[in-house]
Amino acid sequence: MTEVKMTVNGKPASGAVEGRTLLASFLRENLSLTGTHIGCDTSQCGACVVHVNGEAVKACTMLAVEADGAEVKTIESMANPDGSLTVIQQAFQDHHGLQCGFCTPGMIMSASALLKDNPKPTEAEVRHFLDGNICRCTGYHNIVKAIMAASGQDVSALAAE
């Protein structure tokens, strides 16, 4: 067993893990942060996206020991300090960018990373960026619309699909 220490959602976190323990498993099982979903274990679905040192990472393909000393943010840290929804979360709600909700944490974490690097993405850029996130319910149109709305763009001209 190896002791790992990291900052998770602004708070110190540590635990003893086997070398093969995935970051997603450490977050869910050791820290009870179950918003990081495990959908495929193969890096295909994106339900496990978290931010590690400010970068979007699929937590099902990163070992917990690789995050030792890192700053990790999960979906649980995304709300405003008063508990209200952030612009991205509100846009997902307003534009119906979720249905069953399983992919939503990973989508929101990915959207946050995209908007940090590209504050006004085009529809094509949003769709390209989300290539690594799978949603089986929405058809992506409203997710794209929500992300573009969160960036402050007028989405009324986006045709419904």
Image: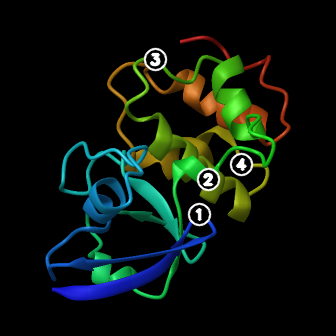
Instruction: Give coordinates of residue 104: x percent, y percent.
Output: 48, 34
Q: What residue sits right under mark 4 in the picture?
A: 121
Calculate the distance from the C-alpha at mark 3 to the C-alpha at mark 2: 21 Å
Mark toward the viewer: 2 or 4:
2
Calculate the distance from the C-alpha at mark 1 to the C-alpha at mark 4: 27 Å
95 and 140: which is toward the camera: 95
Mark toward the viewer: 1 or 3:
1
Instruction: Give coordinates of residue 107: x percent, y percent.
Output: 50, 42
Are the residues tagged 2 and 4 within 8 Å (C-beta)? no
Calculate the distance from the C-alpha at mark 3 to the C-alpha at mark 4: 23 Å
Q: What residue sits right under mark 1 in the picture?
A: 9
Q: What residue sits right under mark 2 in the picture?
A: 77
Secondary structure of the residue carrying numbered label 4:
loop
- The residue at the point 64 percent across, 27 percent down is 92
- The residue at the point 77 percent across, 45 percent down is 80
> Taking 119 as reference, is 19 left or right?
left
Calculate the distance from the C-alpha at mark 2 to the C-alpha at mark 4: 24 Å
Q: What residue sits right under mark 3 in the picture?
A: 99
Residue type for callout 3: Gln
Task: Compare marks 3 and 2 and give the one earlier in the sequence.
Answer: 2
21 and 110: which is toward the camera: 21
